[in-house]
Amino acid sequence: MNIVITGSLGNISKPLAQELIQKGHSVTIISSKAERRDAIETFGATAAIGTIQDPEFLTQTFLGADVVYLMEAWEGIGSVFDKNVDFVAAFTKIGNNYKQAVVASGVTRVVHLSSIGAHTDKGTGSLYIHNTVETILNDLPESVSIKFMRPVGFYTNLYRFVGTIKTQGAIIQSYGGDQKEPWVSPLDIATTIAEEMEKPFNGRSVHYLASDEVSPNEIARTIGEAIGMPDLKWQAVPREQMLRQMLDAGMNEWIANGLVEMYAAQESGTLYEDFYRNKPAFGKVKLADFAKEFALQYHK
């Protein structure tokens, strides 16, 4: 099949492209950076240099594709520390660009990387943008089949805590404890998406993605052992304190408030209600596996 992938050489798009090429598919990778052309072509993909902010470019790139993989890349949007960015408007534009390009190119099979929380437009904080884009894509003609892929939180998000581990000896968050929640490896996401691309497409479907189920305290123990800090703790602080720290650091107000609301939904479990109603088979990469990777990065 001819498959077009957005997301450049990200931690999902790159292993996804490599797996599809190994299976004999023809893969085109969209990247906004011309300097990535050689790296893309090195492992057998075709580079399409342009931006997802340009629906005409997307249309031309999608022409002749059997499947397109769409993700909400932050390309061209701005930093979470830019106080003037309207993130809802920015992601709405990307969703509409994808919709326009799919219609204009005649693509009939779409795999969309969405997120946990996309099942609702309330109570999920900054994950609201994924519901927004799913809603836009759901308005495509019925002739377009879509597989909405909803991963839970990525293991790689734990890299955000390297700073506080090194400076304060703790993982600091606005919730904690022994309540388990699902996490996922980007590698398991890539493998599952590659498998779904080869399966029949029929209308609209939702697929949740997860690799392991662990509590905050288990994460601290596992990461701590891997980095040589067996006493590492996951420290919960009041939500108001977390919000104030993010705002004082210069974070965009919508993002900061959205993160705190998302963390609250994680703590209460409401974020995962639809996930557990449609619980998937878990992937192969467990937290203990990721902890080894984390340790390598931590000690660099």
Image (spheres, rainbow, N blue to C red):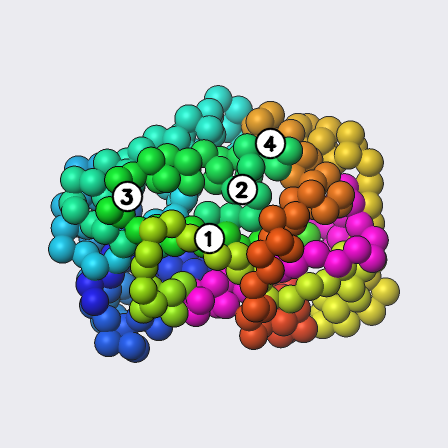
Q: Is residue 180 magenta?
A: yes
Measure the alpha-carbon separation of dots 4 and 1. Answer: 19 Å
Q: Which residue is mark 4?
A: 122
| Residue 142 numbered mark, or none | 3
Tell me the quarter of the picture where residue 38 sits: bottom left
Q: Earlier in the sequence, mark 2 or mark 1?
A: 2
Of badges 1 and 3, nearer the viewer stands 3
Q: Are marks 2 and 1 in contact (CB under 8 Å)?
A: yes
Outermost residue on the right side: it is 231
Q: Earlier in the sequence, mark 1 or mark 3?
A: 3
| Residue 206 numbered mark, or none | 1
Is residue 8 visible from the viewing direction of this image? no
Q: Is residue 211 magenta?
A: no
Q: Are marks 4 and 1 in contact (CB under 8 Å)?
A: no
Q: Which residues are magenta?
A: 163-192
User: SS at mark 1?
Assistant: strand
Q: Give the side of residue 214 with respect to residue 75, left or right.
A: right
Q: Which residue is mark 2?
A: 119
